[in-house]
Image (tube, helix red, strand yellow):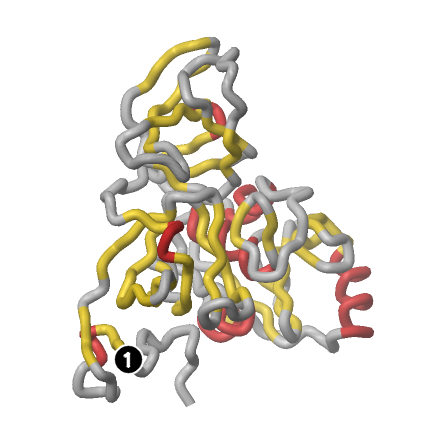
């Protein structure tokens, strides 16, 4: 049976690449759209359960828009589902930077701007244009949730360029320390275990699927049960994943602490075993 999370078809419409392999009413080439709100969920079906999320500036490949819902897939990993069409823009804005600490945008590049700021989560992707100076550098971006022709301004110290890619997945995951645990979350507003691993990997240029079962099958290379674990390795349980920090601790987004937290590895393994069972896989990320 096909995994709906990866099947770019819904019965009415299918990705053009599936023509001749799958029956559908019509086949179309996807059109790239960009998320124009701080965070938007990817749903299994319109008004259905949340599977994952997209943050501002991330790309969604749209196959169909119907009754206010866009069907397609996340460009970062091919994750298929539905998002609210009103949260997307078809105005090109190729990202240059990513948000690396809780950030905000102002209507003017002014630290004393009288208008209330809007929030941007860690993980948002921004197309930074001109730079402005007021106490710090401010990057000019398209205004979130606003008219595509209006601008907002973000403090540059909260951003990092997309290139060159980062090199330490654990360091990237540590940016989310204290972020609330959120099932299906993919941003600094709320994140889950597989979302944390994916964010860390993508920041380092490592291709990574969205859910922990997909990661356990395909991410990096498997390790033998008795293998020595090193910083950045992954430990999987049924429905859960954690990163090895390298000093006897793991780092994970978890519903025990309800946040992204460090935990003693042996303590966590014993605790999780009583609820979810034993470790199911260990994997090593590519260098």
Residue at 17% across, 87% down: 20
Circle 1 sits on which residue?
Answer: 12
Is the residue marked by circle 1 packed among few (<14), some (14-19), or many (20+) residues within 10 Å? Answer: few
In the figure, 212 relative to 57: above or below?
A: below
Secondary structure at numbered mark 1: loop
Of 278 and 239, the residue lying toward us? 239
Q: Position of residue 124 (x, y in %)?
A: 44, 42
Classify residue 276 as left or right of residue 240. right
Q: As displayed, is residue 93 above or below residue 27?
A: above
The quadrant holding residue 228 is: bottom right
| Residue under the point 59% across and 53% down | 191
Quadrant in which the N terminus appears: bottom left
Residue 158 seen in render: yes
Q: Is residue 64 left or right of residue 207?
A: left
Horizontal relation, residue 139 to residue 253: left or right? left
- Frontmost residue, 237 versus 232: 237
Residue 18: x percent and y percent?
Answer: 22, 80
Above or below residue 194? Residue 38 is: above
For the residue pair 211 and 61, the one nearer the viewer reads as: 61
* Residue drawn where x is 40% and y is 39% of the image: 145
Residue drawn where x is 33% and y is 33% of the image: 142
Instruction: Assign the C terminus to one quadrant of the image.
Output: bottom left
Total marks shown come to: 1
């Amino acid at each position: 049976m096909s995994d709906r999370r990866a099947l770019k078809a819904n019965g009415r419409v299918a990705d053009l690449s599936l023509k001749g392999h799958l029956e559908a009413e019509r086949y179309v080439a996807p059109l790239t759209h960009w998320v124009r709100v701080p965070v938007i969920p990817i749903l299994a079906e319109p008004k259905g359960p949340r599977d994952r999320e997209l943050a501002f500036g991330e790309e969604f490949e749209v196959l169909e828009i119907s009754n206010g819902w866009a069907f397609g897939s996340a460009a970062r990993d091919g994750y298929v589902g539905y998002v609210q069409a009103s949260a997307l823009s078809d105005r090109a804005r190729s990202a240059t930077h990513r948000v690396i600490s809780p950030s905000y945008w102002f209507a003017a590049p002014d630290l004393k701007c009288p208008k209330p700021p809007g929030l941007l989560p860690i993980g948002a992707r921004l197309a930074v244009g001109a730079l402005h100076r007021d106490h710090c550098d401010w990057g000019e971006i398209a205004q979130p949730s606003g008219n595509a022709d209006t601008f907002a301004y973000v403090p540059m110290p909260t951003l990092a360029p997309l290139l060159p890619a980062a090199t330490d997945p654990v360091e990237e995951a540590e940016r989310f320390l204290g972020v609330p645990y959120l099932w299906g979350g993919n941003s600094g507003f709320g994140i889950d275990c597989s979302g944390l691993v994916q964010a860390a990997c993508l920041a380092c240029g490592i291709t990574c699927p969205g859910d922990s079962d997909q990661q356990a099958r395909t991410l990096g290379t498997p390790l033998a049960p008795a293998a020595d674990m090193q910083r950045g390795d992954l430990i999987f349980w049924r429905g859960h994943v954690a990163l090895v920090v390298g000093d006897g601790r793991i780092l994970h987004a978890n519903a025990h602490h309800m946040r992204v937290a460090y935990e003693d590895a042996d303590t966590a393994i014993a605790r999780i075993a009583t609820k979810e069972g034993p470790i199911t896989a260990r994997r090593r990320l590519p260098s």
